[in-house]
Image: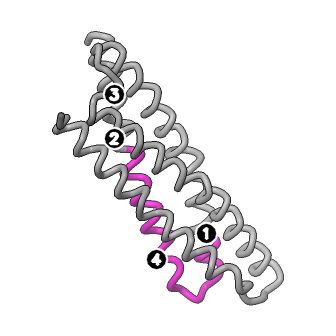
Amino acid sequence: MSGYLLIKTLHIISATILFGTGIGIAFFMFRSHFTPDLQQKLYATSTTVLADKLFTLPAGLLQLGTGLWLVQEAGWDLTQTWLLLSLCLFTLAGLCWLPVLWIQAQLKKNLQYCVQHQVQLPANHERLFRVWIILGWPAFLALALIFYLMVSKPQ
């Protein structure tokens, strides 16, 4: 396998991990919101934080690195419409994801405190969770659109 095909394969695999893990952990954490059991909420939130560290972050970095390498190797111009849009959408997804990391850490902290002290969730927990959901949608849609742009390469 040539170096180009190896990097392209890594790019596709990391895109799949980034998108799939994002949807999977978001679904897992979203579903936990509807249980009254704080232990279950804490488990889901802790797992989400861990999954972002183990999968989302490395896959996102690999996406950027392999993508830029492929552009250079293929001799594409970064100002081509599909590449420029892809970079803008990737940036949008990243800008949505960064505050999500902080929000998830706060949600986990709230839950740890509540489980340890056997108290109800603070008022800001629901607000943080809503912001987490709101930020997830543009990131999800941006990544879905990037898949389309990578396949179709519209001019």
Q: Is residue 26 magenta?
A: yes
Q: Is residue 131 magenta?
A: no
- Give the label, 4 or 1, closer to the camera: 4
Q: Give above or below for 127 relative to 86.
A: below
Q: Which residues are magenta?
A: 17-43
* C-alpha span from label 2 to label 1: 37 Å
* C-alpha span from label 4 to label 3: 41 Å
* C-alpha span from label 3 to label 1: 44 Å
* C-alpha span from label 4 to label 2: 32 Å
Q: Main secondary structure of the magenta part?
A: helix
10 Å neighbourhood of mark 3: few (<14), some, or many (≥20)?
A: few
Image coords of residue 105 (percent x, y): 69, 62
- As drawn, the label of residue 85 is 2
User: What residue is drawn where x is 41% and y is 42%?
Assistant: 88
Q: Tell me which numbered mark, 4 or 1, is placed earlier along the sequence.
A: 4
User: What residue is drawn where x is 55% and y is 76%?
Assistant: 130
Q: Quadrant of the N terminus?
A: top left
10 Å neighbourhood of mark 1: few (<14), some, or many (≥20)?
A: some
- Give the label, 4 or 2, closer to the camera: 2
In the picture of the structure, the residue carrying the numbered disc 1 is 43
Q: Is residue 119 left or right of residue 58?
A: right
Image coords of residue 129 (percent x, y): 58, 75
Q: Tell me which numbered mark, 2 or 1, is placed earlier along the sequence.
A: 1
Count the marks. 4
- As drawn, the label of residue 79 is 3
Give the structural element (helix, strand or loop) at label 4. Answer: helix
Q: Amino acid at mark 4?
A: Arg
In the picture of the structure, the residue carrying the numbered disc 4 is 31
CB under 8 Å between callouts 4 and 1? no
Q: Amino acid at mark 1?
A: Tyr
Q: Give above or below for 4 relative to 44.
A: above
